[in-house]
Each structure stands twice: as structure tokens, then as C-alpha cells.
Amino acid sequence: MGWDMKAWLVLFILVFSGLVKAQSDLESDIDIAVQNAKKGIYWVLNNIPEKKSHLDNDLIADDKLFASVKLSKEINGVKIEAIGFNNTYTVTIKLFRSNESLEKDGFLNKKENSENSEEGK
């Protein structure tokens, strides 16, 4: 193998290893943003207001915004939107949970559910 071939092989290995590291860093940053959005969802589920029909809140730790959450009560459940942040990455998760599933999982009391149903009439 000549010097030219060895130089191209070394260059190829260096470029390829740099691309693999960049992809790994990208996936890691996105995973952290997803985890932050999940934390926002769990925070909202544990803090569903009894009286209010909407909730908007930013979750901050160590002087950094890690999630922004929105909750709106619908006729048969709640709609949740959580945006997770990490560095310059944002991930949005939107979901709908029915009142029945919220009761089953312990996030909503039956009394609250019956009051919400009566308000919708």
C-alpha cells in the first residue's frame, strides 16, 4: 500500500469517526429534550387544577427552562402539550387523556370528574 492510499484511509477513518460522534451527540441532546418534555407531562398530570379549565406553566431548574406545559380541560378529559428543551433543541409532545383513564391512574378524583361533567351540561 502506497502513502497515498494510507493517507486516504486515515482521512476516511477520521471523518467517519467524527460523523459518528456528531450523530451520537445529536441523539443524546434530543433524548434529553424528550425526557424534559416527559417530566412536564408528569408534572401536569400531578397538578391538574380543580377549578381552572386551562393551565400554562414553565418549569425551571438551575436557572434553565427545561419544559413548558399547557393543559386544557375538554368535555371528557384533558389535552396536554409539553415542550421539552435542551440547549437549542425542542421536542413537543401532545396527548389527550380521558377522565376515566385519569381516575384509573389516580390523577383525578371521581368527585372532580362528576363536577366537570355537570359544568359541561
Image (cartoon, rainbow, N blue to C red):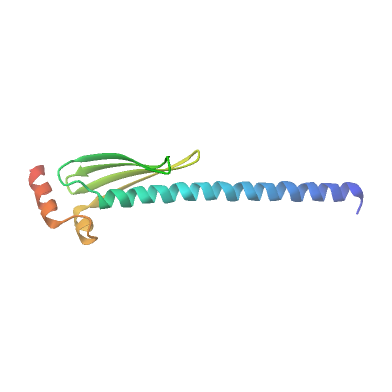
Count up the numbered dots: 0
Q: Which residue does the image show at 16% across and 47% down from the upper left?
A: 50
Which residue is found at the position 20% from the left and 44% from the top? 74
Task: Find residue 22 and report its horizontal and vertical position in percent.
Answer: 62, 46
- Image location of residue 82, percent across then percent down: 35, 44
| Res. 55 image quadrant | top left
**Residue appearing at x 85%, y 47% in the figure:** 7
As drawn, 121 above or below 111: above
Task: Please state which of residues 97 and 68 is positioned toward the viewer in this rendering.
Answer: 68
Looking at the image, residue 77 sits to the left or right of residue 43; the answer is left
Which residue is the extreme one toward the bottom? 104
Q: Who is closer to the viewer here, 8 or 71? A: 71
| Front-most of residues 15 and 55 | 55
Q: Could you say where residue 107 lies in the image, as x and y percent from the top left?
A: 23, 56
Horizontally, is 20 left or right of 46 in the view? right
Measured as percent of width and height from the top left, residue 62 is found at: 43, 44
Q: Work out which residue is located at the far front of the displayed protein and give it.
A: 62
Quarter of image, res 59: top left
